[in-house]
């Protein structure tokens, strides 16, 4: 199957032309004639594997789209547009297109948005290859029916990503030929209804996860993911009763649970693969002999969202969890998020410790080379008599750049940070791409209940809060309580921006995006005469640079609630337009 899978992927990848044709058109090419290939159960399985491959590759990165600099389409468009993070980097001249989105001064040629849009349609095309050739009367075996069902959910998920980011983009329900010029959907509900219909059509033929410990059931499309996806689409549509029923089906299945508090830091990492909290994740198994592993392994994510190594001495001692790469620091927790989680959860909560690390934790609780010495046998052992007081005066650690870390307030992203456990022998990422976890299902269910006056959702909300060890525990189920909890729990998972838009509070919550981009410095290495001990502090002297440089910046409801259709799409397709240009 592996040989067929690779060949088919290469065939599919080679057939994109330009503009809409490039990303939506498949011609009849390849060493195996199409009419001879799509026949057997094995053919259906191979085509489905290609759909999974395409989803994994093009949700992981934009390589091959000729747009975007190897961003992560699953996260970057939505996270850059949120109040979750500062789109940082080396300085104000770095990571410009991320900053454009974060501060809302982008246009329709922004490569992060363009590349992501194209990637979603490539995923849809690959799913349609399965559906077109094996659905309806052609689905004459249980295997073919299941393959079609899984492909429909993959297609539905890609359409949901489009609907979350763009208003009424085209619905593509079949493989398009070179002359196709798809039109915008009639409205957003048409796309959401299409997604819901795909879920309903697929559900009878999907497998179910066998148990909470079923790791194989976590890395394939199942009834659990289909119901979760259906529920999410219904929330976006405003069908809260329908969403509640779909999400309750996931909860009542008994096949999912939250990992314990002390295992929260394994979420999104190698040791957490396929755990009981995973509703669906795309499996990434390292194999040095497989062509294209680099493209599937989020090759630049570890660099984009790592800690800025050019400005800080990273923990490098025995037992360090940080690999030796020199990342670029494009994702730092926003001050708003840091303040909110500290106030709501408390410094000592399990979620705070799993999601973000303080500068003191990085300095004094993580290992550095200077913390060790060689014993008589030449082995590295903890340095004798080395105390916290010694570490505070040790100038071999800390933010060594006098100007500090740009776009930073003293807390480091830990939740999605590439760690040594995630490192393959050739230094690629080996974590799975998590699409949906049970915590999000519980919070979506709590929201649907809050929207329908059903107090049953309070238990779901409290379950997430208790696992987080949050100081605040909701005593009543309100939409505001769910909104705050989802902000904290689903941080850096791509949900915040579209949630704010559909809740109608994006303008309120995003009004300060880009207006405050401070530096975080260490007094030991400051430009002024350094102090004898480490002391972190926020430098706000140039924090408002973006407002001064781009006075037109800032979220505007009528302009930024949805991303623009990419310029290259509109250039070749006269039938397509932006949502606010009707």
Image: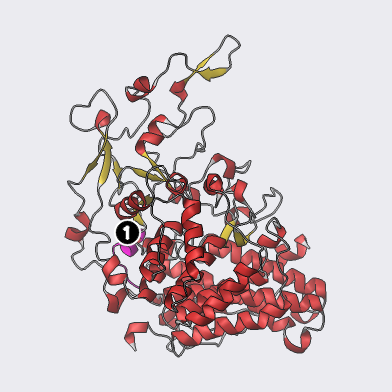
In-image side of 155 versus 86 (left or right): right
Taking 424 as reference, is 295 above or below it? below
Query: In the image, residue 193 lies at what x, y percent?
Result: 53, 85
Q: Nearer the viewer, residue 211 or 377?
A: 211
Q: Nearer the viewer, residue 457 or 434?
A: 457
Taking 116 as reference, is 87 above or below it? above
What colouring method underlies this structural image? Answer: secondary structure
> Which residue position holds label 1?
99
The N terminus - image quarter: bottom right
At 20% across and 54% down in the image, what residue appears?
545
Taking 221 as reference, is 429 above or below it? above
Asked which quadrant contains residue 376, the reply is top right
Q: Nearer the viewer, residue 48 or 163?
A: 163
Query: In the image, residue 356 lies at what x, y percent?
Result: 41, 46
Residue 179 can be seen, yes or no: yes
Taking 548 as reference, is 566 above or below it? below
Query: In the image, residue 277 lies at what x, y percent?
Result: 59, 57
In-image side of 319 versus 524 (left or right): right
At 39% across and 85% down in the image, what residue appears?
577
The C terminus - image quarter: bottom left
Question: How many numbered discs, if any?
Answer: 1
Tell me where the magenta segment starts and ends, as one range: 98-108
Instruction: Report helix, strand or loop for mark 1.
Output: helix
Q: Would you say residue 103 sits in the magenta stretch?
A: yes
Q: Would you say residue 258 sits in the magenta stretch?
A: no
Query: In the image, residue 40 lies at what x, y percent?
Result: 82, 76
Asked which quadrant contains residue 59, the reply is bottom right
């Amino acid at each position: 199957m592996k040989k067929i899978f690779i060949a088919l992927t290469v065939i599919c990848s080679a057939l994109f032309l330009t503009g809409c044709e490039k990303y939506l058109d498949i011609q009849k090419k390849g060493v195996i004639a199409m009419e001879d290939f799509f026949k057997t159960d094995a053919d259906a399985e191979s085509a489905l594997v290609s759909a999974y491959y395409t989803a994994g590759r093009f949700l992981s990165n934009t390589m091959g789209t000729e747009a975007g600099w190897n961003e992560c389409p699953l996260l970057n468009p939505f996270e850059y547009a949120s109040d979750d993070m500062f789109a940082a980097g080396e300085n104000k001249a770095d990571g410009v297109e991320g900053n454009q989105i974060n501060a809302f001064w982008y246009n329709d040629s922004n490569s992060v948005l363009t590349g992501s849009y194209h990637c979603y349609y490539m995923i849809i095309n690959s799913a349609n290859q399965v559906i077109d050739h094996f659905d309806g009367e052609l689905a004459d075996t249980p295997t073919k029916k299941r393959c079609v069902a899984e492909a429909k959910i993959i297609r539905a998920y890609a359409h949901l990503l489009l609907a979350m980011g763009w208003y009424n983009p085209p619905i593509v329900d079949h493989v398009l030929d070179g002359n196709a010029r798809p039109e915008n959907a009639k409205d957003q509900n048409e796309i959401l209804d299409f997604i819901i219909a795909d879920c309903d059509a697929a559900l009878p033929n999907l497998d179910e996860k066998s148990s909470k410990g079923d790791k194989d059931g976590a890395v394939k499309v199942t009834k659990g993911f289909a119901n979760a996806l259906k529920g999410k689409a219904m929330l976006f549509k405003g069908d809260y009763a329908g969403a509640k029923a779909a999400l309750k089906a996931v909860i009542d299945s008994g096949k999912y649970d939250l990992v314990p508090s002390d295992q929260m830091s394994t979420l999104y990492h190698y040791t957490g693969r396929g755990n009981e909290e995973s509703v669906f994740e795309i499996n990434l198994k390292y194999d040095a002999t497989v062509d294209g592993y680099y493209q599937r392994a989020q090759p630049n994510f570890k660099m984009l969202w790592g800690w800025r190594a050019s400005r800080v001495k990273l923990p490098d001692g025995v037992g360090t969890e940080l690999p030796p790469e020199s990342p670029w620091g494009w994702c730092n927790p926003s001050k708003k998020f840091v303040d909110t989680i500290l106030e709501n959860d408390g410094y000592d909560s399990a979620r705070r410790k799993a999601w973000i690390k303080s500068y003191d934790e990085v300095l004094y609780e993580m290992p550095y080379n200077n913390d060790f010495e060689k014993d008589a046998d030449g082995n590295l052992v903890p340095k004798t008599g080395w105390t916290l007081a010694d570490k505070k005066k040790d100038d071999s650690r800390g933010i060594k750049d006098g100007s500090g870390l740009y776009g930073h307030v003293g807390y480091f992203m830990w939740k999605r940070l590439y760690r040594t456990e995630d490192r393959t022998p050739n230094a690629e990422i080996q974590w799975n791409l998590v699409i949906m976890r049970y915590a999000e299902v519980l919070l979506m269910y709590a929201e649907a209940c809050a929207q329908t006056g059903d107090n049953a959702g309070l238990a779901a909300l409290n379950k997430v809060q208790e696992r987080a060890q949050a100081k605040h525990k909701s005593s009543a189920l309100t939409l505001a309580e769910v909104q705050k909890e989802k902000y904290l729990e689903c941080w850096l998972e791509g949900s915040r921006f579209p949630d704010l838009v559909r809740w109608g509070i994006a303008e309120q919550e995003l009004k300060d995006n880009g207006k405050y981009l401070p530096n975080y410095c260490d007094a030991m290495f400051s430009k002024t005469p350094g102090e004898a001990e480490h002391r972190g502090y926020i430098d706000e002297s140039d924090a408002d640079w973006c407002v001064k440089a781009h006075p037109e910046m800032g979220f505007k409801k009528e302009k930024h609630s949805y991303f623009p259709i990419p310029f290259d799409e509109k250039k070749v397709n006269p039938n397509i337009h932006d949502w606010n240009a009707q």
